[in-house]
Amino acid sequence: MQRHCLTYHRRERADEGIAGPGRVDGGDAGSRRAETAAIGGEGDSNDNSAAALLMGQFVTLAAKRSIAVMIAHHAAKGRDPKSAESAMGATSFVNLSRIVSNIEPLAENDAGLLGLPPWEAKSVFRVLGTKQNFNPPNTDDRWYRISAVEIQNQQPPIYVNGDKVAVVEVFQPGTSGPVLPHQLIHDALVAVDLASPPLTPASQSKTRYAAPVIARAIAHHRGGCASDADGKAVLDHLTSAGLVHVMSAKMRRAGGRSDDLKCLVLTPAGKAVIGPANQAPVILHSPRRVPQCQLRGL
């Protein structure tokens, strides 16, 4: 099947609305001119009727040429990028499309799921189908990253370095950098291992929630300042990487009463990261006294 390319654009003046296409590649010159004239015309990009007529012309062209037509469209600022309603202009552009995709930047709270620090999340994004079911961010999605590349246009001695331009590259979680530094992971694991009382991933706990403790442990890697969100991202990475897991600790108190607590414990892989010199003995302490306790895996 021959490849064809259709470029469609809007005019600079807002009052001219929808404008004609730039080019249609493929086929003879006469047919290209005929198709260009057929799709041409002007209208209001917010007019559903005009947009529906335009989409119908694209369908005719796609069927005649045995091609797929992709339209790049603007998304409104402040709207949910995962919603088809985020597209600007007439709703007919979305309603009459077979597939609608949108760009979703990685949220800082989800950065840990990809092994990224939250301060790197702004440059990573994925392409989602807004007419399909959605999944939370995971490493199986196809991710992209905006990176700065220096071009070779330096002119020393005045311009020693070349200009930097933004490019989009494929990002593979776990293999593409940047990832959480090894020493940062080490310090976070030590904080979890040495915590007394043992930490928990539950944010409802005011005294044992792991995120603030991890944030304090990694603060020196962040210029002396780390937020609870940073600690939560690191905790998510430790969990997804299999370095820590949750175990149930049955803590006996005076009078025969006992409590079940969910505690973060290093896995064998986590203990291997910090080394035997930094490992704490497996003793769980109550805030009030040192009880007898038993650990059992969930």
Image (spheres, helix red, strand yellow):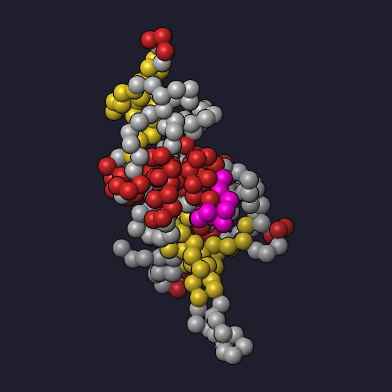
Q: Is residue 222 visible?
A: yes
Asked which quadrant contains residue 16, the reply is bottom right
Q: Which residue is situated farthest in the bottom direction here?
A: 157
Q: In screen coordinates, is 157 left or right of 136?
A: right
Asked if the stretch drawn in magenta spans residue 276, the answer is no
The magenta stretch is 220-227
Q: In screen coordinates, is 282 left or right of 221?
A: left
Identify the image quadrant of the N terminus: bottom left
Magenta region, mostly helix, strand or loop?
loop
Q: Position of residue 173 (x, y in %)?
A: 37, 53
Q: Position of residue 7 (x, y in %)?
A: 51, 64
Identify the image quadrant of the C terminus: top left
Q: Is residue 83 visible?
A: no
Q: In screen coordinates, is 4 left or right of 123?
A: left
Q: Position of residue 127 (x, y in %)?
A: 45, 51
Q: Decide: is 23 above or below 239.
A: below
Asked if the stretch drawn in magenta spans residue 226, the answer is yes
Residue at the spot x=58%, y=51% of the render? 225
Q: Which residue is situated farthest in the left direction here?
A: 268
Question: Of residues 159 and 96, which is closer to you in this image?
Answer: 159
Question: Of residues 191 and 108, which is closer to you in this image?
Answer: 191
Q: Position of residue 181 (x, y in %)?
A: 42, 56
Residue at the spot x=44%, y=69% of the render? 25
Q: Decide: is 86 above or below 179.
A: above
Question: Of residues 279 and 13, which is closer to you in this image?
Answer: 279
Residue at the spot x=66%, y=57% of the render? 17
**Number of numbered callouts drawn:** 0
Q: Which residue is situated farthest in the top direction here?
A: 255
Residue at the spot x=29%, y=47% of the render? 276
Q: Decide: is 154 above or below 69.
A: below
Q: Which residue is situated farthest in the front direction here?
A: 289
